[in-house]
């Protein structure tokens, strides 16, 4: 691990552990080196002023909106819409490595604002390159989490290649993360179950909890399956981004009723730039105001349990849960890398 990355990880552990009871953390945001965009990608984003969905944002842009939304930190990874792929797996791997390197540079520039995470892709880069990217992200960059996106990159979440990559991520001391949504058939609940059971003693971060880019109607079944699965598999952690707000509220109630360890397994998030940080965290805060007043809430589960949500529980979902999760992941990473 590079000296800068090692120092960053140590500082993050200290900051997360020391401030876990007050931090607000966005558990899903994408940062892009917008100055490096070229060709068709630059033309696409600059020529359509009305287009926003997925428009790349830089690390400084994220900081500006985090400050606007009173969000202290964010987990960041690359934006797949801004990483150019060709038919050449080796070139694709270099593009993805460059995107991962920008994430590291952003975290070094803003060391207590960003928690950096990696990204690999066995479909576009090939399995050997995908494993090489994992090695670089963990060994050199010191990333505690490495993500795969089976949905948009079109491969099953529980394929043999994915399970090999998950095994290597864990061996190196990091944790695996996945886009888990209803927007394609590649991330069904049973596939995530198999990944979670592959190494049941280690957490798996499933981003979107069944949402993603799917329509509300298309996502309905996976929303419910994800909630049931998460309450059966305590090693699954969910980032609540790109998901219908009414279902997010129901997830929070169900997990709070279930108690520990499940009540520590949900993290508020925005999926920036696919979701606005200010919009999402403004919504979370006002929703929690209603949940705190359970006696007057329309949900019968809250009326029956009027003190279900405490300020401490709310702070956990807004950031404390993820602070504890990330600090533990970073400690494990440093321990294994040092052995």
Image (tube, rainbow, N blue to C red):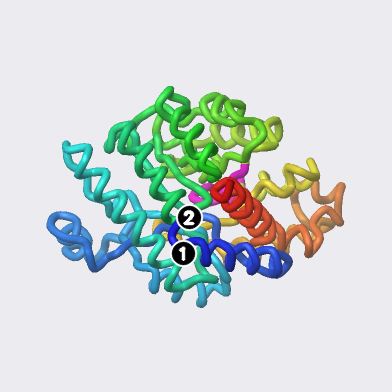
Label 1, on which residue? 3
Q: Which residue is mark 2?
A: 142
How busy is the neighbourhood of tag 2: few (under 14 within 10 Å), some, or many (20 plus)?
A: many
Disc 2 is placed on an element classified as loop
Q: CA distance from mark 2 to mark 1?
A: 10 Å
Residue drawn at point x = 54 percent, y = 35 percent: 220
The residue shown at (44%, 33%) is 165
Relative to 69, say whether 321 is above or below.
Answer: above
Q: Can residue 279 be seen from the camera position used here?
A: no
> Is 246 situated above or below 8?
above
Q: Secondary structure at mark 1?
A: helix
For the residue pair 94 and 20, the one nearer the viewer reads as 94
Residue lying at the far left in this picture: please name it.
39
For residue 44, say whether it is visible. Answer: yes
The number of discs equals 2
Place residue 126 in its image quadrant.
Answer: top left
**Position in image of residue 181 (x %, y %):** 47, 38
Residue 78, horizontal then vertical, whole percent: 37, 54
- Segment colored magenta: 237-247
The image quarter containing residue 296 is bottom right
For the point 38% across and 66% down, which residue is it?
A: 105
Contact (CB < 8 A) between labels 2 and 1?
Answer: no
Q: Is residue 250 magenta?
A: no
């Amino acid at each position: 691990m590079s000296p800068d990355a090692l120092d960053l990880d140590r500082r993050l552990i200290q900051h997360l552990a020391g401030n876990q009871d007050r931090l607000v953390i966005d558990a899903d945001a994408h940062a892009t080196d917008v100055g490096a965009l070229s060709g068709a990608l630059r033309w696409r984003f600059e020529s359509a002023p009305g287009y926003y969905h997925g428009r790349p944002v830089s690390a400084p842009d994220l900081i500006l909106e985090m400050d606007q939304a009173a969000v202290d930190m964010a987990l960041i990874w690359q934006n797949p819409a801004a990483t150019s792929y060709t038919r050449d797996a080796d070139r694709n791997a270099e593009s993805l490595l460059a995107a991962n390197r920008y994430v590291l540079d952003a975290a070094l520039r803003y060391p207590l604002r960003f928690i950096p995470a990696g990204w690999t892709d066995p479909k576009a880069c090939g399995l050997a390159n995908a494993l090489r990217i994992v090695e670089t992200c963990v060994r050199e960059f010191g990333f505690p989490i490495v993500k795969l996106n089976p949905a948009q990159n079109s491969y099953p979440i529980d394929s043999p290649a994915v399970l090999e990559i998950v095994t290597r991520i864990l061996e190196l001391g990091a944790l695996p993360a996945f886009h888990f949504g209803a927007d394609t058939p590649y991330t069904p609940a049973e596939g995530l179950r198999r990944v979670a059971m592959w190494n049941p003693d280690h957490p798996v971060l499933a981003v979107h909890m069944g949402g993603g880019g799917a329509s509300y109607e298309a996502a309905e079944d996976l929303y419910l399956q994800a909630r049931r699965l998460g309450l059966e598999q305590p090693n699954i952690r969910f980032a609540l981004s790109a998901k219908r707000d009414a279902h997010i509220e129901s997830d929070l109630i169900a997990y709070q009723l279930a108690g520990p360890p499940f009540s520590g397994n949900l993290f508020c998030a925005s999926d920036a730039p696919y979701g606005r940080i200010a919009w999402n965290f403004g919504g979370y805060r006002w929703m929690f105001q209603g949940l705190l007043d359970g006696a007057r809430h329309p949900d019968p589960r809250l009326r029956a349990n009027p003190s279900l949500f405490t300020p401490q529980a709310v702070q956990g979902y807004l950031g404390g849960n993820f602070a504890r999760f990330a600090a533990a992941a970073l400690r494990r990473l440093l321990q294994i890398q040092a052995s």
